[in-house]
Image (spheres, rainbow, N blue to C red):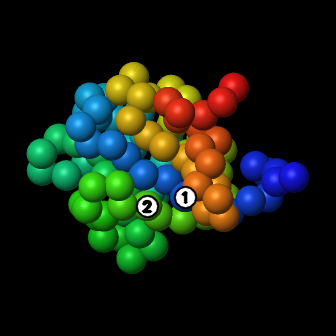
Amino acid sequence: MTDVATDQLQVWVDQDLCTGDGLCVQYAPEIFEFDIDGLAYVKGPDGELRQAAGARVDVPEHLRLEVIDSAKECPGECIHVVRAGDGVEVAGPEAED
């Protein structure tokens, strides 16, 4: 049995669904950032945007709640938070409630 509270999480943004609303950037600016196209992307610990489709970054433990809230509140339902170990979505449009 795995535990979302302790599992390493990763996050990615589906830019095809991104509405550019910006809630994610407000919740977790260390993880999400807008690019020149007005869409949100994830960024790595080096601050560089990950622009490849489906690019994932690790969620630091201290930002776990902010990233999960971003996925839950996103009007475009484009943020996917998955367990790093098995890829199961824990927050986002494909997560089981």
The residue at the far left in this view is 37
- Badge 2 amino acid: Arg
Residue closest to the eye, 58 or 25: 58
Under circle 2, the secondary element is loop
> Residue 92: x percent and y percent?
53, 35
The picture places residue 95, in percent across and down from the top left corner, at 60, 34
The disc label shown at residue 10, or none? 1
Residue 56: assigned label: 2
Q: Does residue 3 appear left or right of residue 86 in this picture?
A: right
Q: Residue at x 12, y 50 (%)?
A: 36
Residue 63 seen anywhere in this rendered image of the structure? no
Point out the tag, 1 or 2, that comes first from the N-terminus. Answer: 1
Nearer the observer, 32 or 87: 87
Question: Which residue occupies the extreme bottom position in the image?
Answer: 46
Mark 1: which secondary structure? strand
| Image mark for residue 88 | none
Q: Judge the density around disc 1: few (<14), some (14-19), many (≥20) Cα neighbours within 10 Å.
A: many
Amino acid at circle 1: Gln
Q: Give the residue displayed 38% in from the left and 35% down from the top.
A: 78
Do tag 1 and tag 2 residues touch (Cβ < 8 Å)?
A: yes
